[in-house]
């Protein structure tokens, strides 16, 4: 069969430390062993997780231009893609019989005739390769959260403050003197209750506090709602105390909020009810929320709120909670895999994890080498400074650059370490939950059931009395395979 070989590294540094030659050599030997006829070889330096991959598209164009099916031979699943968009393109070509894909390390070949177990192995490998990339992204978020816990703002300074570098060369935030008096006076005047936003702007202008500042109504409203000025950061719905200069007191801020929100009105407080499916289901016909009510006979019934008046009174269905539980339970039962399939899939994921660990070790090696070079340069510069070969100013400037670079590299090492440790844990967690989902759900109390379903379900719809159960990834894919695949038959056909 005519074959193209694909060898890929993510970065130029990876290529220099661990060239694609080793991948090419393995794949050529494998092609010869399997009597595959190599017609073209592709050697790429390109991230497999970014949205637009020009080299990848070039390979697909070459494959689709051939008049006969082509085999694509790669070292591992993550060498060809770490994102679902590219995986869909490959899968479409596979289903059409245009390609078959050989994964050398996984000892896996997927074709248009592949069974459900083989396709699941491919899908799971892509999913957890993507998971590794997402872990790196999550670690950036964790770094932000750590800054917040330390009282540091992780983004651009709010109005009234400015981003600077401190004496140690690290990012810091200080008060912007152009705005401090303006902000303080804005709160003090508005707290009297004698000003609207428009009259407040006029008063600040008359006091000469608005020079070269465009005081729009939105600008003023944003200032008066920002808790940063009394010492509390609001980051994605959570609040943290900060270490920077406080322009106003919390008491003054609270006084302004009372006036802005008409404090004399009683706020509505939602009374939480132990309804298992509360907020989890929408009407398939009109998109409104499915709400719950307890009837006089003490049973709980669900129905469309009919907010858009789409249904007539006769069309509006009411369904008991027990019927919904029964439909969900039937789906959760089907997540259970035969033991031999579970064992085979676990082994496949272990092999995939070994490849991710190799990827982690390669990156860590490169980063540690760079860290050692920086340490050596800092030591040499210090010797040059002591011997008078460089001035103190030059030493301070270069040392600051190297120390910043060192901190960045150490941050990358920490991110990769967390991603590597979480990779197999996440894969194992998915399988464990899928195997125990039905028993956990059946044995839980109503509120526990609701929390468990909130973790598993998404975008569920009710059509009359039929519940369309939609699980979150990757449980939705597991459910598809368990519904469509004859597991024991598929696995037996795979065993030689």
Image (cartoon, helix red, strand yellow):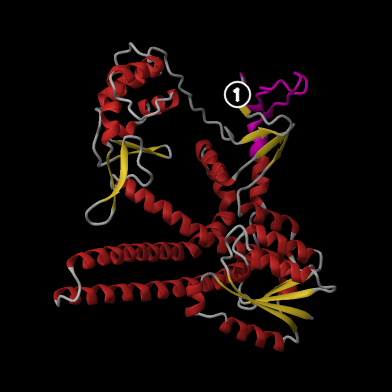
Quadrant in the picture for residue 344:
bottom right
Q: Name the magenta segment's main secondary structure.
A: loop
Q: Is residue 319 left or right of residue 65?
A: left
Quadrant in the picture for residue 193:
top left
Q: Residue at x 23, y 37 (%)?
A: 245
| Residue 477 position in % (x across, y down) | 66, 55
Task: Give the answer, above or below, for where 19 lies relative to 308.
Answer: below
Q: Residue furthest right?
A: 67
Residue 297 part of the magenta segment: yes
Using the image as rendered, state which of residue 295 and residue 276 is in the foreground: 276
Secondary structure of residue under mark 1 = strand
| Residue 377 position in % (x across, y down) | 28, 75
Label 1 sits on residue: 293
Residue 168 part of the magenta segment: no
Q: Is residue 262 left or right of residue 313?
A: left
| Residue 354 position in % (x across, y down) | 52, 73
Image quarter (top left, top right, bottom left or bottom right) of the C terminus = bottom right
Image quarter (top left, top right, bottom left or bottom right) of the N terminus = bottom right
Task: Give the answer, above or below, for where 440 lies relative to 299.
Answer: below
Quadrant in the picture for residue 291:
top right
Q: Is residue 38 left or right of residue 296?
A: right
Task: Give the answer, above or below, for where 491 lies relative to 496.
Answer: above
Report the magenta residues as a range. 296-325
Using the image as rendered, state which of residue 140 and residue 320 is in the foreground: 140
Is residue 183 visible to the viewer in this orientation of the structure?
Answer: yes
Is residue 111 visible to the viewer in this orientation of the structure?
Answer: no
| Residue 375 position in % (x across, y down) | 28, 73
């Amino acid at each position: 069969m005519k074959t193209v070989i694909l060898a890929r590294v993510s970065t130029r540094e990876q290529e220099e430390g661990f060239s694609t030659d080793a991948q090419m050599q393995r794949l050529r030997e494998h092609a010869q062993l399997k009597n595959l006829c190599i017609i073209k070889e592709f050697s790429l330096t390109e991230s497999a997780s970014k949205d637009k991959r020009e080299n990848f598209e070039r390979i697909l164009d070459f494959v689709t231009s051939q008049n006969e099916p082509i085999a694509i031979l790669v070292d591992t699943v993550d060498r060809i893609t770490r994102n679902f968009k590219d995986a869909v393109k490959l899968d479409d070509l596979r289903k059409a019989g245009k390609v078959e894909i050989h994964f050398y390390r996984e000892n896996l070949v997927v074709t248009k005739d592949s069974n459900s177990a083989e396709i699941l192995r491919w899908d799971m490998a892509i999913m957890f390769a993507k998971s590794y990339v997402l872990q790196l992204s999550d670690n950036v978020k964790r770094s932000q959260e750590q800054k917040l816990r330390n009282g540091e703002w992780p983004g651009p300074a709010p109005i009234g403050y400015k981003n600077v570098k401190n004496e140690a060369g690290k990012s810091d935030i200080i008060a912007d003197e152009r705005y401090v008096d303006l902000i303080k006076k804005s709160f003090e005047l508005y707290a009297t209750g004698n000003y609207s936003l428009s009259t407040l702007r006029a008063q600040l202008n008359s006091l000469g506090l608005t020079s070269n500042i465009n005081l729009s109504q939105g600008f003023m409203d944003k200032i008066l709602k920002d808790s940063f000025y009394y010492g509390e950061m609001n980051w994605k719905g959570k609040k943290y105390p900060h270490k920077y200069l406080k322009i106003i007191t919390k008491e003054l801020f609270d006084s302004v909020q009372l006036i802005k929100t008409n404090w004399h009105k009683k706020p509505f407080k939602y009374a939480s009810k132990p309804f298992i499916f509360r907020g989890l289901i929408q009407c398939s016909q009109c998109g409104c929320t499915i709400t719950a009510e307890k009837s006089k006979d003490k049973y709980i019934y669900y129905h469309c709120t009919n907010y858009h008046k789409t249904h007539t009174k006769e069309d509006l269905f009411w369904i008991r909670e027990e019927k919904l539980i029964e439909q969900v339970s039937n789906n959760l039962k089907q997540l259970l895999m035969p033991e031999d399939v579970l064992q085979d899939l676990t082994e496949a994921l272990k092999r995939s994890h070994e490849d991710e660990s190799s990827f982690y070790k390669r990156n860590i090696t490169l980063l540690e080498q760079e860290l050692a070079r920086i340490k050596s340069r800092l030591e040499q510069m210090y010797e040059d400074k002591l011997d008078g070969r460089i001035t103190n100013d030059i030493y301070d400037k270069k040392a600051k650059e190297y120390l910043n670079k060192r901190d960045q590299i150490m941050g990358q090492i920490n991110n990769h370490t967390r991603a590597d440790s979480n990779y197999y844990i996440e894969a194992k967690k998915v399988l464990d939950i899928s195997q125990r989902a039905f028993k956990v759900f059946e044995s839980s109390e109503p509120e526990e059931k609701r929390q468990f379903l909130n973790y598993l379900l998404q975008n569920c719809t009710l059509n009359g009395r039929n519940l369309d159960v939609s699980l979150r990834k990757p449980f939705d894919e597991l459910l598809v395979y368990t519904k469509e695949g004859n597991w024991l038959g598929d696995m037996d056909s795979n065993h030689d």
